[in-house]
Amino acid sequence: MAHPVYVAVDWGTSSFRLWLIGKDGSILGERRSGEGMTTAAKTGFADVLASHLAALSVPQNVPVIACGMVGAKQGWVEAGYVDVPASISSILTGAVSVPGQSRDVRILPGLAQRDKASPDVMRGEETQLLGALGPDSKGLQAVCMPGTHSKWVHVQDGEVIGFSTFMTGELFDAVSKHTILSHAVANAEEAQADHSAFRAAVSAAFRQPAMASNLLFTARSGQLLHKLTAAGAQARISGTLIGLEIAGALSDAPNDTPVTLVASGRLRGLYETAFKFLSLKYTVIDADIAVRRGLSAAAEAIWPN
Amino acid sequence: MAHPVYVAVDWGTSSFRLWLIGKDGSILGERRSGEGMTTAAKTGFADVLASHLAALSVPQNVPVIACGMVGAKQGWVEAGYVDVPASISSILTGAVSVPGQSRDVRILPGLAQRDKASPDVMRGEETQLLGALGPDSKGLQAVCMPGTHSKWVHVQDGEVIGFSTFMTGELFDAVSKHTILSHAVANAEEAQADHSAFRAAVSAAFRQPAMASNLLFTARSGQLLHKLTAAGAQARISGTLIGLEIAGALSDAPNDTPVTLVASGRLRGLYETAFKFLSLKYTVIDADIAVRRGLSAAAEAIWPN
């Protein structure tokens, strides 16, 4: 086995992902589990990490760099926030050491926007951001990191000038499970996704964001009056919330601001479909690659060879 | 006891309200219960009605006029919809008789908007609308009927030209109970309501509706960064959803369109606060009075003396 140099950990609320990285940046080993902050806060962060390191037989002298909710107040060790505006690379300087460990373990800080009118926080996405853009990005950019709480970051010449959280994923769940629309989407998973209904909903919400909570209701009224299918209703809910998010995220951005989408899997597909239909200029980077690249940048800054 | 002329029933999804009306329009008796459509569909609509009529000793020859979800497909007898555009008074002509009853029982139809892009339906609110405006209203008006599913109706010279449902109340419940914001609002009921946070949120969502799902998240980030209270977080959620609703409902209406608010209790207070803060021209009519007046107009049209 090639010589391991450091361990990179993306430790979120509900997921744990670990990579063992070699000298040339190659991935020597990988672990994934559901032992996110919520679980680890009960079973012990040190034990969770130790078990995954043992599974990969990681030598004692190999250090660990982590990002995400593991650095929250309810996490392992609070890693604080870097306040924006701030350069993307400033998170590299804010890592905290976990005390009492035989191994060198550090956790990266999050970002905070302390503006009274638009307070916001992130943990983990700042590392994805670093990995997606690198420390030296040029010009004005919008970075979209979709998820339970989607983050949109506005960057100017390598400096984070502002960011916003949109509760898109969580609203989709709450609306689909805990409102009258739960009947409208029953068994939608078993059907083919309705891309045309999704695109129409994205466009409607993007053009008329003020109508969002009405557009959601058309998932029901469309069934009562126009035999909309369950898959169509689900696409309408998802498209409405994503269209609303994009409208909000770009509302203060100049036209033609290039968008970097940091996503993987199903979400990547949905957001790409939305961006294309809205004729937005965008590039994509896989979310896993972005977070690993960001953790690597941090490891190389902290432990330079 | 004065001579009873008819019985008026507002029979919604989760509530049942009945008034015994005398010759001069006076209320001779009243019943309220939670035996809405959901309950009555199991226990039997005829039995529910009979028990309340018996409690008031209503003579067998007194007819009953009802509105609301009792006329839905899942209700007692399907009363269909009147399609808009339609005159407010057209619902008077669409009542259906409940077959097999010894007493004359009629259910008023709902309204349907069959437009492909904005399908919508209402049941019960059309009767409130009739009661609030009367059949001969003049000019352009917007009528707001807030609730679990708020309805906004646009009326021109007594004709309903369009309407929209906003899921405001149900979204408030789902967001407050089934998202991360449930922590932010924990125990908010025990504290004094935060009117200033409510007004600020109404205004922010009204001005920037596209930011709605971000403004919701500030109920959490405001606590993390600015010690926002639980009552403040609750006010922010409620204000955001109501501000979004008003922005959407008035987005296509000319400035200065007069608004008629049909509401009672806590909701009336919230919407009045919002309208005042947004400098909207409005009048208020109590929701109970409006539905009773609408049912009375229907009874007098069906059973003229």
Image: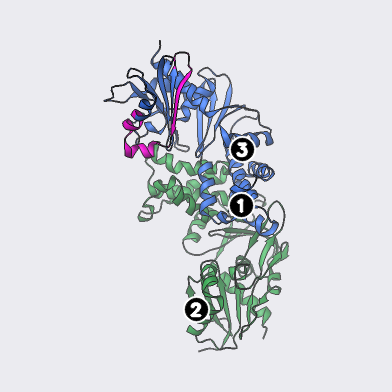
Chain colours: A green, B blue
Q: Relative to B207, does residue B127 appear above or below in the rendering?
A: above
Q: Disc 2 on helix, strand or loop?
A: strand
Q: CA distance from mark 1 to mark 3?
A: 22 Å
At label 3, which amino acid type do we have?
Leu
Q: CA distance from mark 1 to mark 2?
A: 34 Å
> Residue A231: horizontal and vertical position, in percent?
39, 50
- Mark linked to residue B214: 1
Q: Dot 3 falls on which chain?
A: B
The magenta segment is B22-50
Instruction: Work out whether residue A120 or residue A128 is closer to the camera in this orientation and state it.
Output: A120
Image quarter where the C terminus of chain A lies is bottom right
Q: Residue furthest left?
A: B100
Q: Relative to A116, does residue B5 appear above or below in the rendering?
A: above
* Residue for badge 2: A30
Instruction: Work out whether residue A214 or residue B95 is closer to the camera in this orientation and state it.
Output: B95
Q: In the rendered structure, does residue B23 fall within the stretch colored magenta? A: yes
Q: Relative to B89, does residue A183 appear above or below in the rendering?
A: below
Which sits earlier in the primary sequence, circle 1 or circle 3?
Answer: 1
The quadrant in which residue A79 appears is: bottom right
Q: Residue furthest top?
A: B305
Q: Dot 1 falls on which chain?
A: B
Q: In the rendered structure, does residue B31 fall within the stretch colored magenta? A: yes
Instruction: Work out whether residue B89 or residue B131 is closer to the camera in this orientation and state it.
Output: B131
| Residue A108 appears in the figure | yes
Q: Residue furthest front?
A: B1
At label 2, which amino acid type do we have?
Glu
* Residue for badge 3: B270
| Marks 3, 2 in one chain | no
